[in-house]
């Protein structure tokens, strides 16, 4: 159990550290955008997950596949919902755009919770 906690703690520390630099700390010290939806934040998070899966061996490979699909579909759905909300080039109904927001955010939340479960299912060395 202690090894799983250390794995979880180190994973979140890596995600926080890389995201901190990718965001530019919102005070102008780093030359990145101050936008909350900066693409570097998403890329940094995906990079951290890739490093985690490269370093640790997971017992149940199907959970990794499900996690990846949920994260990708959720990211595209949420990003598409944000794009439609701000630009709306097709003049779609606001209800549909809100559903895209909710579905995309929910899928990303499920992917994140699945990652929490996966961190406790790493193989012992």
Image: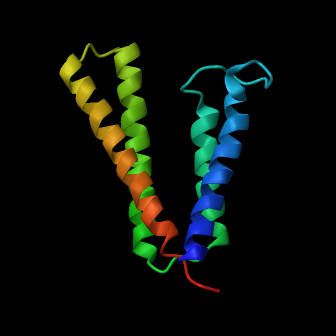
- 121 or 54: which is nearer to us? 121
Q: Position of residue 109 (x, y in %)?
A: 38, 47
Q: In the orientation shown, which residue stands out farthest toward the front?
A: 2
Residue farthest to the bottom, as pictured:
125
In the rendered image of this protein, does residue 4 appear above or below residue 16? below
* Residue shown at the point (34%, 47%) measured from the top left: 107
At a point 61% along the width and 42% down the height, the residue shown is 43
Q: Is residue 72 left or right of residue 9?
A: left
In this orientation, does residue 50 appear? Answer: no
Q: Position of residue 32 (x, y in %)?
A: 73, 24
- Identify the image quadrant of residue 18: top right
Q: Quadrant of residue 106?
A: top left
Question: Which quadrant is home to the C terminus?
Answer: bottom right
The percent coordinates of residue 77 (x first, y second) are: 36, 37
Q: Residue at x 38, y 34 (%)?
A: 78
Q: Is residue 18 left or right of residue 66?
A: right
Observer-nearest of 8 and 111: 8
Which x, y percent locates residue 12? 60, 53
Image: 108 above or below 82: below
12 w.r.t. 61: above or below:
above
State how many labels appear.
0
Residues 80 and 90: in front is 80
Viewer can see residue 31:
yes
Q: Is residue 9 left or right of residue 97?
A: right
Q: Residue at x 73, y 19 (%)?
A: 27
């Amino acid at each position: 159990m202690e090894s799983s906690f250390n794995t979880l703690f180190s994973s979140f520390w890596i995600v926080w550290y890389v995201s901190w630099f990718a965001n530019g700390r919102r005070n102008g010290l780093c030359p990145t955008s101050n936008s909350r939806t900066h693409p570097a934040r998403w890329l940094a998070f995906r990079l951290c997950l890739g490093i985690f899966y490269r370093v640790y061996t997971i017992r149940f490979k199907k959970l990794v596949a499900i996690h990846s699909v949920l994260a990708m579909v959720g990211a595209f759905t949420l990003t598409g919902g944000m794009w439609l909300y701000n630009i709306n080039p097709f003049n779609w109904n606001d209800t549909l755009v809100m559903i895209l927001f909710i579905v995309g955010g929910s899928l990303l939340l499920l992917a994140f919770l699945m990652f929490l479960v996966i961190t406790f299912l790493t193989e012992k060395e």
